[in-house]
Image (cartoon, rainbow, N blue to C red):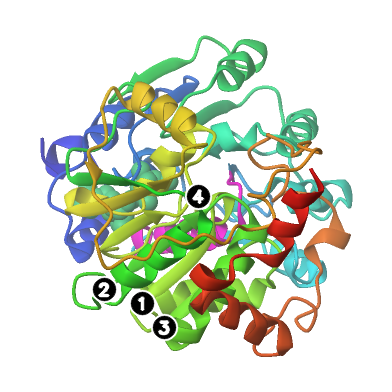
Amino acid sequence: MTFKELDLSNQLQYAIDDLGFENPTPIQEQAFSVVRSGKDVVGIAQTGTGKTLAYMLPILRDLKFSKQQHPRILILVPTRELVLQVVEQIEQISKYINTRVLGVYGGTNINTQKQSILQGQDIIVATPGRLYDLALSNALKMKSIQKLVIDEVDVMLDLGFRFQLMNIFDVIPERRQNILFSATMTEDVDALIDDFFKNPEKISVAVSGTPLDNIEQVSYNIPNFFTKVNLLHHLLKDKKTFNKVLIFVGFKRTADLLFKHLEEVFNDEMCVIHSNKTQNYRIRSIRQFDEGKNRILLATDVMARGLDFDEVSHVINFDTPDFPENYMHRIGRTGRAEKAGKTILFSTEKEQEVKVGIETLMNYEIPVLELPEEVEVATMLTEDERPREDQGISKNRTSLEYVPGPAFHEKSEKNSQVNRGGSYRREIAKKYKKPKTRGDKNYNKHNKKK
Ligand code: ADP
Ligand code: MG
């Protein structure tokens, strides 16, 4: 099918031509008439298959020019970075139409956003928290919302967001079209649909959890954190092959620790993003990575959810995600728009179980590669790897990343700066270079006591 057969308006077609897109992706093709029908819609398609335009094209097709102040379309996404990307996509595609679109998210001045709202908007793209604050303060009137889009709906139902979504449902008109999109489906999403939506039409381009053929997957079995670090050093040395690398870790704590062990060698080519970094730092890091100024971006799951980067050469899973869906979202940052992509999974013995979970979801066994000979097997263990009694780490996929509320968002730039240098770093660097002979003092002490 071509875009010509989709019955786009001329203005949308011109914008598509400018973007150089030839044919609609399967989800775009299938969602178009269903979204236009006004029925509730649930769309499932793999990452990187153009879901944003799958809901935006039909919405813009039918959005009549209006001077009214209050918005008619509300799009909810989980992160501020995604707000920016979705706004950008809408601006590109509505280049020849008079559409007013505004992105709102926390961590920035709410009064500036109120001013922009006053000027009148058609489409609001928002994170749930800030949206709700704006609605409560009456700055944003929700009574004219006709269509609600929830993008990345499964992550939106994780802790914190669920509550905010319920609040938002309460303040938007009951008579509206609900449009949900995601690459993965969970039971929570099913429950939400049952509770709130009217006979939604499901469009499923692939069974939830189907990986894309154009992403080549491999894995390594690695004994521990520091051997993973050694392997990473080994791989990243090859700048030609590993020319745009997104590294994922599950927790910001791991991100900071890993960053410390990479920055000595890769400092100039590397950025790290997680929820404790300031908004400015995050936006800058993402831009620098996307434009190719930085070769390496280290990110947590939630931070990079749904983001669209141009031609990522490799996605490296430094740890194996507990939730198989997160693996799908991680690897989906490469191989976008049918380009070839590569992904590498690092798993320890402990992580084998969750790895099997991922393979079961995908119905695909990830090939295992031998650890290259040059890679030194480390004996030093991290604090987390040492045996201990209190294993009460929360299993929730976002609880450590997302703590809603202003205190959490408004970190000062100073507080969240990466600590470069200092004695700690030297100490770690020293240790790390000689793990074999020295072992880990603390670890030895700990074992002796037992
Ligand atoms: P998803 O939300 O499914 O992960 P996105 O909507 O972010 O995917 O789109 C992924 C990439 O594909 C974007 O860079 C987008 O510009 C591009 N894209 C979208 N539709 C098409 C199309 N019909 N042809 C080619 N590229 C497309
Ligand atoms: Mg998306």
Inspect the image, locate mark 2, and give the three-letter code of the amino acid beneath it. Answer: Asn
Which residue in the protein does label 3 denote? 269
- CA gap between label 1 and label 4 equals 19 Å
- CA gap between label 3 and label 1 equals 5 Å
- CA gap between label 3 and label 2 equals 10 Å
Inspect the image, locate mark 3, and give the three-letter code of the amino acid beneath it. Answer: Glu
Could you tell me if residue 33 is visible in this image? yes
From the viewer's side, name the closer residue of 132 and 295: 295
Q: In the rendering, at what x and y percent does residue 392 appear?
A: 79, 36
The mark lying in front, picked from 4 and 2, is 2
Say whether marks 3 and 4 touch (CB < 8 Å).
Answer: no
Label 3 CA crowd tier, 10 Å (few <14, some 14–19, many 20+): some
- Name the residue rendered at 72%, 48% in the picture: 400
Span shown in magenta? 76-95
Which residue in the protein does label 4 denote? 305
The mark lying in front, picked from 1 and 4, is 1
Q: Is residue 271 above or below residue 32?
A: below
Which residue in the protein does label 2 denote? 243
Q: Is residue 267 above or below residue 224?
A: below
- CA gap between label 4 and label 2 equals 21 Å
Which residue in the protein does label 1 denote? 295
Q: Which of marks 3 and 1 is nearer the N terminus?
A: 3
Say whether marks 3 and 1 touch (CB < 8 Å).
Answer: yes
Say whether marks 1 and 2 touch (CB < 8 Å).
Answer: yes
